[in-house]
Structures are given as structure tokens and as C-alpha cells.
Amino acid sequence: MAHKIEELPIYPKVIEFWLAVNALLEKPKLRSDRDLHGQISRANSSIPSNMVEGFEQGGDRAFANFLTHSKASLAEVLLRLKQASFKNYITQAELEAVSVAGKTLGEMLGGFIKYLRRTDWRDRGSHTVDDSPPHPNE
């Protein structure tokens, strides 16, 4: 059982996707379209934010609900990036790379959501205080 969000195998994939999208958001053409840029940025930030917030919930069903929001935000990011591609703000190759990563992440989130709903643990222990010193590599 994971005691920290970073211990979940899916979490590094979420951060990797988040960073890839943030890199695209730095493209000058996309930055100039403030509405589209803002929509992508907010939806992208929502993916890990909902995951972290859900992890802190008392049970797996609540966590699954927050992950559902993360998955929906992921779908929004992918749609908005298609719009950015149509407007020639990002290249087709850039869109394809992030779309492949997004599709994989969406499948992972979907599987994790199903698992959490099936197990439905009521107390994953995320509310305990960890008094141990941090690991030197953290």
C-alpha cells in the first residue's frame, strides 16, 4: 500500500505528461492565444492536482472519483492540443507525441479507477502522521 502519492507507479507518468504539456505551453504561438493557452494550462494542472487531492481522501471510492476528474482533464488537454495543432501553434509531430503519452496515461488511469472501485478500501492509512526522517535521496 502506498503511503505517499509518489509511491504510486502511475504518479511519475502523470508528472511526465504534465511536464511535456507545459513544454508545449511555452511555444510563442500558443502563448499568444491567451484563451487557449489558459484552458490547456488549467486542465493540465488539474490532472495531478485532482490525483493528489483524491489520494488524501479516506477511502478508495473517493480517490477513484478524483481520478475520474483527472482523466476528464486529460481528455480536455488532448482536445485543446488538437485545437492548437489545427491553428498551427504546435506541430503534428508534437501533437502525436503528447497524444500517445496521453492515451497511455488515460488507459492507466482507467484501470486504476476500476481497481479502486473494486477494492473499495475505507481507510488506506493516508491520514497517519509520518514521523520518520526523510530519506536522504528525497
Image (spheres, rainbow, N blue to C red):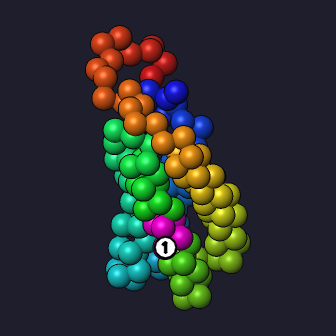
Question: How many numbered marks are there?
Answer: 1
Q: Is residue 92 visible?
A: yes
Q: Give the residue at mark 1.
A: 76
Coordinates of residue 39 in the picture (x, y in percent): 38, 75
Residue 131, given in percent of the width and then of the height, sits at: 30, 13
Left or right: where 68 falls relative to 133: right
Residue 129 versus residue 110 in the image, above or below: above
Q: Is 121 rendered above or below residue 133?
A: below
Rendered location of residue 7, percent (x, y): 52, 31
- Quarter of the image with the C terminus in it: top left
In the image, taking residue 45 as reference, residue 77 lies left or right, namely right
- The magenta-colored residue range is 72-77
In magenta stretch: residue 2? no
Position of 131 with respect to 1 (left or right) is: left
> At 43% from the left edge and 71% from the top edge, which residue is drawn?
40
Asked whether 16 or 123 is in front, the reply is: 123
Image position, residue 58 (x, y; %): 34, 38
Q: Main secondary structure of the magenta part?
A: helix
Report the residue that reaches farthest toward the bottom. Answer: 87
Query: What residue is rendered at 38% in x and 32% in y?
Result: 123
Location of residue 88 (image quadrant): bottom right
